[in-house]
Image (spheres, rainbow, N blue to C red):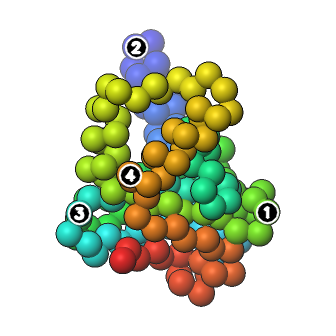
Amino acid sequence: MKRKNFRWNSIFIIVVIVASISLTVGCDLIDKITDKHRIIYLYNNSDRDIIVVQSGCEPRTISCYPSCFAQELVPAHSNYEMKVNDVVRLSWEDVISNYPGRAAFFILDADSVRALNNDTTINRKPMNDVEQEELDIMYDKRTTIKYFYYSISDLNKMNWTITYP
């Protein structure tokens, strides 16, 4: 009796492993067939660490950072793959198509962000719109190096690669 159960357990484990591999390969294959992009390649060719923030916000609306879609640290002279949410199987085309025309990519100086976050003189919880705007301006002036705005067709032309500088 034990030998029969062992055989069925072994078969069950093999079936689960094969099914898992098939699902993983199948999902990647679907992405290739539909020509959807789940990765944006980030290249930091500068001498300093940067943080790349992606959102649908327009220029000078830094308060959108907490609700941004992706925020990634890219060390100096390195590259990074900015991926979309793996759980819901979104593509970058899906994400960007929900924005009005194009996506915003903010390049932030990582050292300035760290310094600003450690500044105890700043009220981190603005009480009204004026205080929020003041915090946005301070954050913008002290941390933001560059803005990029790309549509899906722009990213296609760039082979889904963003290079700084």
Q: Which residue is mark 1?
A: 100
Whichever of callouts 1 and 4 sits on the residue coming sooner in the sequence is 1
> Mark number for residue 2?
2
Which quadrant does the C terminus fall into?
A: bottom left
> Which residue is found at the position 63% from the left and 81% from the top?
154
Marks 1, 4: nearer the viewer: 4
Which quadrant does the N terminus fall into?
A: top left
> Mark number for residue 81?
none
For the residues labelled 2 and 4, the Cα–Cα distance comes to 69 Å
Whichever of callouts 4 and 3 sits on the residue coming sooner in the sequence is 3
Marks 2, 3: nearer the viewer: 3
For the residues labelled 4 and 3, the Cα–Cα distance comes to 15 Å
Whichever of callouts 1 and 3 sits on the residue coming sooner in the sequence is 3
Q: Which residue is mark 3?
A: 48
Q: Type of residue at label 3? A: Arg
> Which residue is found at the position 61% from the left and 71% from the top?
149
Residue 79 image point, x, y percent = 32, 67
> Which residue is found at the position 46% from the left and 25% from the top?
123
